[in-house]
Image: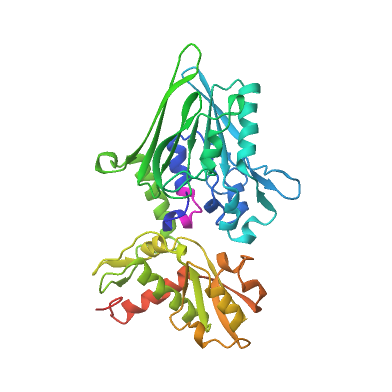
Amino acid sequence: MFQGTAISNLTYGGVVVEALNYIGIDAFTIGNHEFDWGVQRIIDLIDEKSSQVKVNFPLLGANIYKISTNQRAEWVNDYVIIERGGLKIGIIGVIGDYQINSITAPYVEGYKFLNPVPIIKSLAFELRANKNVDVVIVLAHDGDTTNIPSDSFNRKLSYLEGMYSVDAVINAHTHYYYDRTIPRQNRVELPVVQAGSSGSHIGYIRLNLDKKTKKITSVSVDTIQVGYSLSENNPTILEIIEKHRQEVKKKLDIDEALATAGTYISKDTFANWAVNVMKKYSKADFAVVNSGAFREGFPIRQNEIIDVQRVYQFMPFDNVVLTCKLNGRQLRSLARNNGFVFSSNFDVNDLKDYEEYTIATVDYLFYKTDYEFLNGREITNLHEYFRDYLILELKTYKQQNKLFFAR
């Protein structure tokens, strides 16, 4: 929720929190990218002693557990109960358990994400049996893709029955947009929705209830594309953004023009250029980065001016660069992974099995035990952001009066 723009990054999500406070949301489920600055930055959102903008809504994460206590983390809640129109509504928040591997490892050291389905089942019963809740909604940072496999998260929730059942599921994380219902035997279908990503859609679920029994009789679900008819700017939100923009500009000129595109530049083309920049500034033999590091703002059109805040769109994550020495066999093993972008000089056929090479990458990849980096020698944290390398290199185009990717 907090990543994607220079203003949000440089305020650790403060501008987004203030906007959400104004909107008046009822609940917020923690997702993998809320950990991008570490757990303490999440705690700061509720810690009155912190200078960070505080949330006035509950943070949910029923399956985020501390390893040391085997208890839910104290800085999140299992659920929140709200009342609307004479109904008590319980909202359970969970994150996909596998997403622990989508977070830079040191940022979640000492924590684990449990299987959310048994926890949802238990909490749904607690809400219905002990809290007299009429409706149970799951707000999950997890979801499906283009279909619903038989073993999917949503499908498993549809199997819950009676006091353990849930009435609607709001998804996130996979960035797909869908609105669908899952049939359930002898009862109302389960509506599930995910509203894409980057504010592209709004998810809408309607639950029709019998006023006397407070039982759901029918459901409908939709995703609404955000177009011109829904994009009127709110003056208060604009004021919030501008206030934080001015604060940020005291630290960094996010409007500074860095370069002008000499041609059309795709995300893949930019990624290949960027990983070579990492190699150059880290002084490594090779460099590698995950393709998912590059997000929004693409393609870059010919004659477009690229400024600092655009680079934050390209690469919103505060990834630090590390280097280590790996031998040829280790590098070949690394090259078997899909979704990696290597510097242009990397060729597995040129590697010698036991000769060592210096390779640079970002902390997100480096600390993953699936890869070879932690087995390397001479591990060095450069304490420099990959994104800063890109900004420095783009500046050279302006200084030399050159086009970025001239035709």
Q: Position of residue 330 (x, y in %)?
A: 61, 78
Color encoding of the figure? rainbow
The residue shown at (62%, 60%) is 105
The residue shown at (31%, 82%) is 400
Q: Position of residue 337 (x, y in %)?
A: 53, 69
Left/right of residue 195 with respect to residue 91 in the rendered view: left
Left/right of residue 168 with respect to residue 94 in the rendered view: left
The residue shown at (45%, 47%) is 16
**Residue 396 on the magenta span:** no
Residue 238 placement: quadrant: top left
Q: Position of residue 33 (x, y in %)?
A: 52, 53
Residue range in magenta is 9-15
Q: Quadrant of the C terminus?
A: bottom left
Q: In this orientation, which residue lies closer to the viewer: 111 or 20?
A: 111
Q: In this orientation, which residue lies closer to the viewer: 212 or 248?
A: 212
Q: Position of residue 235 (x, y in %)?
A: 32, 40
